[in-house]
Amino acid sequence: MDRKLYILYLTVFIDLLGFGLVIPILPIYATELGASSFVVGLIMAVYALMNFAFSPFWGSLSDKHGRRPVIAGTVFITAMAFLLLANARTIVVLLLARAMAGIGSANIATSQAYITDVTPRELRAKALGMIGAAFGLGFIFGPPVGGFLKQHYGMDAVGYAAMSLSLINLLLVLLFLPESHHERDSTHKVQMKPVTLAIKALGNPRFRDLFLTSFIYITAFSMMTITVALLWEQRYGLDEAHIGYMFAFIGFSSAIVQGGLVGVLARKFGEAKLMVYGCILVGLGLLGTPLVPVGHFFPWALIPMVLLAGANGCMMPSISSLLSSLADGKEQGQVLGMNQSFGSLARIAGPLLGGALYGLHFTAPYIGGAILMVGALLLVLAFQRAGRERMAADPSSTAVL
C-alpha cells in the first residue's frame, strides 16, 4: 500500500480519536446542562447541519486547490471547536461548539478523494474501508478515555484533550502528508449551495439510488447512536465509563470488519451485494438493541453491536467505492462530498427523530430504524437492477458492480 495512505490513515485516526473522546458523553453532558431529549437531538443535529453545508464545499474546494490545504485547514477548525467545547457552560455555547466542529469535520470526503487519487479501482473498497477502520480504532480508544476524563475531571478536560489531539494531527498533516491531486482544474467553480446541489444530485440517475441508500441507512443508525447512551444509562444502569467501554467495543468490531474483511468480502461478493447484507444486518441489530433483558446486559448487549458493526463495514465502503467508480476524475471530491452531505442530512434527521421517538418509548427509535432499513434494501435492489440494465447496454459498465 502507498506510504501516503498510511500517513492519511494516521491523521484520520487521530482526528477520530478526538471525536471519540467527546461524542458518547455529549448527550449526558447536555442533560446535565438542562437539555431535554429533543434538545439533545438538536445539539447533535447542528453538528450534522454544518457537515451538510460544508462537505460538498470542502470536497469541491479540494478538486480546485488540492486535498492537503483543505485537510489542514479543517483540522485547525476542529481544534478550535474543541477549545470552545472545553469552555461550554451553557447549552448555547455547546451548540456553537458543535456547529464549529461540524464545519471542521466535514473533511471526510476530501480524505476519501485523496484515496481515490492514489488508489487503483480494484483496491478502492479496501482502501476506503480503512477509513472506517480508522474510525473504529478511534472509537476503541476515545470513548473509554473520554468517559474517564469526564467522570473524574469534568468536560473541560475532555475538550482540552481532544483539542490537543487535533493540534498534533495538524502538525502531522503539515509535515508528512504530500499533495495527491495533481490534475486540478483552475476553472472549476466552487459552490456553497448545499440544498441546490442536493436537489441536482437526486436528479442524476448515476448516483441517486446510492445517495438515498446512504441517507436512509445513516438516519437509522443515527437514531441509535443519539439514544443508546441514554438507553444504557437509564434502563441498564451503566455509568459514563461503562458507556465508553461499549462504544469502544463497537469501534473494535468496526475496525476488524472494515480493516480486515471489507477487501475480501468486496472481491468475493461485490459492493452491491454487500449493501444487501448490510441492510439486513442493520435491521436485526437495531431491533435487538433495546430488547436485551435487564439484569443480563452482558454478554447479550454485545450481539446487536456486532451486527451493527458488520453492517457498517458492508455499507459505507461499498457506497463510497461505487460512487467513486461512477464519477469521473475531476468530480471525485464533489461527488464524495455530496455523499457526505446526504449523510449529514441524515445525521440531522436521525437525532431529531430518534430523540422525539425515545421520548415516546425507549424501543421506538430502534423499531423505526429497522423499518427505514426495509426502504434502504428496496433502493439497493433498484440500484442492482439498474446496474444489470447498464451491463446489457454496455458490457464495460460491469466494472462498477
Image (tube, rainbow, N blue to C red):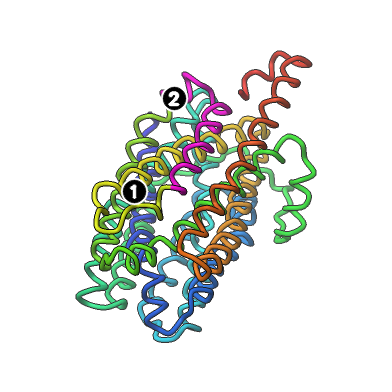
* 281 in the magenta segment: yes
Q: Amino acid at mark 2?
A: Leu
Q: Secondary structure at mark 2?
A: helix
Work out whether residue 92 can be spotted: yes
Residue displayed at 52% across by 59% down: 364
Residue displayed at 31% across by 54% down: 293
Between the residue at mark 2 and the residue at mark 1, the CA separation in whole angstroms equals 20 Å
Disc sitting over residue 88 in the figure = none
Q: Is residue 203 above or below residue 117?
A: below
Residue corresponding to mark 1 = 250
Of 284 and 332, nearer the camera is 284
Which image quarter is the N terminus in?
A: top left
Residue corresponding to mark 2 = 265
The picture places residue 312, in percent across and down from the top left corner, at: 46, 42
Q: Please provide the residue range marked out in magenta.
A: 264-287
- Number of residues whose C-alpha sits closer than 10 Å to that of mark 2, classed few (under 14), some (14–19) or many (20 or more): some
The picture places residue 147, in percent across and down from the top left corner, at: 26, 66
Q: Amino acid at mark 1?
A: Ile
- Number of residues whose C-alpha sits closer than 10 Å to that of mark 1, classed few (under 14), some (14–19) or many (20 or more): many
Q: Is 66 situated left or right of 391 in this image?
A: left
